Amino acid sequence: MLADVPMFADIGGYLSSPSNRDKVVGLLGEHIVLAVAPLLIGLAVAVPLGCAAQRVRWIRPALLGTSSVLYTVPSLALFVIMPGILGTRILDGVNVVVALALYTTALLVRPVVDALDAVPGHLVAAATAMGYRPVRRFVAVELPIAISVLAAGVRVASASNISLVSVGAFIGIGGLGQLFTEGFQTRYPAPIVIGIVTILALALAMDLLLVGLRWAGTRWERA
Amino acid sequence: MIFSQVLAWFGDPQNWSGPGGVPVRVAEHLYYVLVTVLIAAAIAIPLGLVVGHTGRGGLVLVGLANSMRALPTLGLLTFLFLVVRSQGVSTVVALVVLAVPPVLAGSYAGVHSVERDIVDAADGMGMTSLQRLWQVELPGALPLLFGGLRSAVLQVVATTTVAAYVGLGGLGRLLLDGLRSGPGGYPQMVAGALLTAGLAIVLDLLLAGTGRLVVPSGVRLALAGTGGKSRRPGPSPPSGE
Amino acid sequence: MTKRFDDGTVAVAQLDLVAAEGQITVLVGPSGCGKTTSLRMVNRMVEPTSGAVLIEGRDVRSRPPAELRRGIGYVIQQAGLFPHRTVLDNVATVPLLTGTARRVARARATELLELVGLPAELGRRYPAQLSGGQQQRVGVARALAADPPVLLMDEPFSAVDPVVREGLQDELLRLQCELGKTILFVTHDIDEAIKLGDAVAVLRTGGVLAQFDPPPRLLAAPADDFVAGFVGRDRGYRGLSFISADGVAVHELATVPVGARACGHGWRLAVDGAGRPRGWLTPAHTPDVVTEQGLRAGGSLHRLGGPMRSALDAALSSPSGLGVVVDERGAAMGGVLAEEVLAAWRRQRGADAR
């Protein structure tokens, strides 16, 4: 039935070629790496930054200001400018990873600050009064309580990264985004649809994974 | 070196005149952004307000908005172009899809953020459903609603550059044409990036200013009173405060 | 000691007081009087601008803050329990910080839960599953976990309802009787201060000490108008809490058991099988069988050995004018008259004046 609709017939046709199937799987793998690596890097950078913004008064406006300006630079522009800044070759995955890591950091700084703000002051005071030193207090008390607010920000950043990777197709490194340029150049929608559907599925899978991680990390909230 | 090349690019009068000049590109870009955001606002604000007001379908809406965020604009754009064969329509539709989620989330969260007590008080005073929405929930929702609009504008300004790929104008032209002309095009790409970021910042400041005018000062004061805890090591307030 | 904040406001002005070892010292005053700031200077969460805090003769600044704090118990208003840890792990926090083995720390925590009157099963729950009163008890248990000699309590009972608060206060007095800690207790509630404190320091706005005295003296002789105003209404009446009613005559009481025939006349007290008061029979009411429904509700009860305040209140609130005195099992054993309580009070005052 579905195969009678021209679009689905096209997709079936495209996927019936083993070389096309291999290509889609390969691009999917590349897409995952290009989306997940910046997410981890961005989180690793944003948490200490947000923590610093909590403690030192002037860092907060500076940090939030910088991150919102950074977010105004189009991803396409960031991708194409990166080689000039990093000294990398234009066809280097590092360009995409660094650019997206910058975005992720910019995107996560505010949720991190908000999440830490949401930790009740009396809990921090109680921990201090019991003799926690600052670093241990941050890791053992503030961070676990901040998880659920933080998780919302990480989910947005994950979806945004997965979608933005495809823009890298302009510089030849876009994971599944390559299917969009291929489809556009050959005037053939099938690879585009496959790309969109796969990206959505990937975003959904990542989101479920993050929800699961959050669930495991905040058992106490549901008790 | 790159810096001086970019300066030279900006200094070249040729880049400022004719159909490919900076003013024309900025105007084109601005035009797509305005059309897109207006359409997105016309769809998303009423929807967000109504769902927030009735409290029904909130979860579905938030989930839908979140999954729409994952839709790759480039994919949608190329697909629509191949199907409808119109640069303008495909670009605007793809960008509207991008702009709707933040506006929707902002207006829904805005209504949702109005405290239960205040809504109860409105009902208790005998306001009709529509009066409550218009006089109580909408004013209270404005700060978050504007936040949603601002983030939609930022995203649309940045992403409109992709429209150049299907042959439309706008600042994306500078990026793509620069990319295609090899290493010599680098100053032009940087110029395009700077112009896009500058446009985004100017629009954001304008919207922030409008927000200050539109959001009732009482709502702003209430937010300032609750936001951000004092880091001063002073005495904690006694109970009941 | 003095604390002046960066913006120039003085939170505590040259406060100088000694909290006696093994006693409860209460800091009380309106908001903004610097009582919490004073408390926090003890465990170095606030550093004094000038002056020093000594514990057992040793300046608190001679020890690193974290180490110092592990040796001082701290209880706050919202209990401050960590929501992501079970009750047991909350109580075990400080022992775990100081490197006690987890098993040992948990065993100790279980004991402490029982000490503060909570069943050990609660240890497996999360704080959010506990009532406000239970959370406060856990907060006290957590502060006691490392067996610190000094306990700082910052409005610990202010956020719970009055009935629960009274229970927690009684519990604290019982615990203190057992443990004999040196407790510094901050509250804005003068009644709480008078009930709990061995000595009470009244602070006025700006952190100036207005009076530092034991509660009876605070009620009988406020230092100035501010203290008198803060101590509030009924202070003469409340002062009776600190005078024993042992000198007040206890009269015999006509009693009839519920379920029996109502004999006698005048006001008669109906009692249950254990002799506990159930209510009064009015002089006009002489039914064949005494039932609960036919009774007039009684007043408050005065426990033998209690203060004049409860004796006077029992007399004033009793419909017959005769206050019911009960023994420690709650059985009625006699009655007191208001005028005789006052006569005893006058004798006592005359003796004090001489």
Image (cartoon, coloured by chain):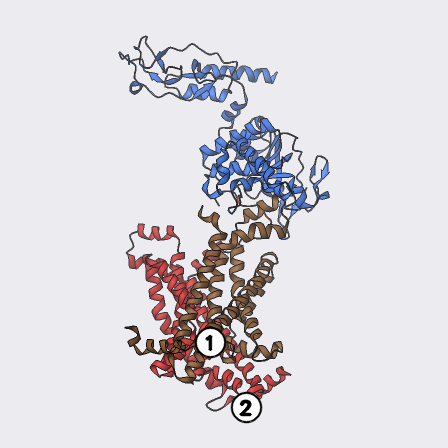
Chain colours: A brown, B red, C blue
Q: Residue at x 38, y 72 (%)?
A: B97
What is the residue that sits farthest to the left in this orientation?
C288
- Amino acid type of disc 1? Lys
Q: Are labels 1 and 2 on one chain?
A: no
The C terminus of chain C - image quarter: top right
Q: In the rendered image, which residue does mark 2 sit on? A: B13
Position of residue C97 relative to residue C56, above or below, is below
Residue A211 x/y as whole percent: 45, 57
Of tags 1 and 2, which is closer to the observer?
A: 1
Residue at the extreme top: C264
- Residue at 45 percent across and 34 percent down: it is C162
In the picture provided, is C233 more to the left or to the right than B109?
Answer: right
Residue A167 on image: x %, y %: 48, 76
Which chain does tag 2 point to? B
> At which x and y percent is residue C349?
56, 18
Which of A128/C231 is in front? A128
Q: Is A48 placed above or below B70 here?
A: above
C204 left or right of C124 in image: right
Q: Is residue B53 visible?
A: yes
Mark 2 surroundings: few (<14), some (14-19) or many (≥20) residues within 10 A: few
Asked if residue C23 is positioned above or below residue C72 in the image, the reply reads: above
